[in-house]
Image (cartoon, helix red, strand yellow):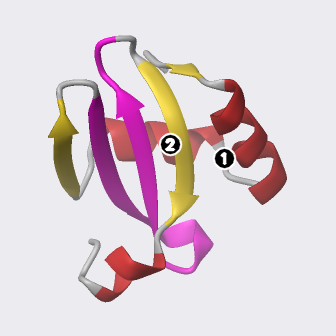
Amino acid sequence: MNYRLSAHAQDVINHRGIALQWIETVLSSPSLTVEKCESEVHYFGTIEAYGNRCLKVVVNPEKRLVITVYFDRQMRKKGCK
């Protein structure tokens, strides 16, 4: 993975059982990308192995840092593919 994990992201991954492979998949081929500002981009992708839930990966592209990761119920309802 070309990104580092923040301490918060690492805690969330460990606590919620999110696989690094899922994060890599979303970052390499997101179904949706939203640039919030120069220092924050949100990547979304559906994880089939986890019941087709929508994984959101928030990244600081300037620092190549994953800030947080979580399954976003709202985006699943909005059609995260």
In front here: 71 or 2? 71
Asked if marks 1 and 2 touch (Cβ < 8 Å), the reply is yes
Tell me the crowding category of disc 2: few under 14, some 14 to 19, or many 20 or more residues within 10 angstroms, Cα based. many
- Decide: is 51 above or below 55: below
In front here: 49 or 17? 17
Label 1 element class: loop
> Which label number is shown at residue 48?
none
Residue at 27 percent across and 25 percent down: it is 39
Q: Is residue 47 left or right of residue 31?
A: right
Q: Is residue 65 left or right of residue 26?
A: right
Residue at 46 percent across and 36 percent down: it is 24
Name the residue at the top extreme: 63
| Distance CA(mark 1)–CA(mark 2) | 7 Å
In front here: 38 or 77? 38
User: Percent x, y for residue 42?
Assistant: 31, 46
Amino acid type, mark 2: Ile
Residue at 33 percent across and 56 percent down: it is 44
The stretch of residues the image draws in magenta is 40-62
Question: Which residue is denoted by mark 2 in the rendering?
Answer: 23
In front here: 38 or 25? 38
Looking at the rendering, in which quadrant would you find the C terminus?
A: bottom left
Label 2 element class: helix
Amino acid type, mark 1: Ala
Question: Which residue is denoted by mark 1 in the rendering?
Answer: 19
Q: Is residue 58 magenta?
A: yes
Q: Is residue 8 magenta?
A: no
Q: Is residue 53 visible?
A: no
Q: Magenta segment, principal secondary structure?
A: strand
User: Percent x, y for residue 32?
Assistant: 20, 57
Q: Quadrant of residue 38?
A: top left
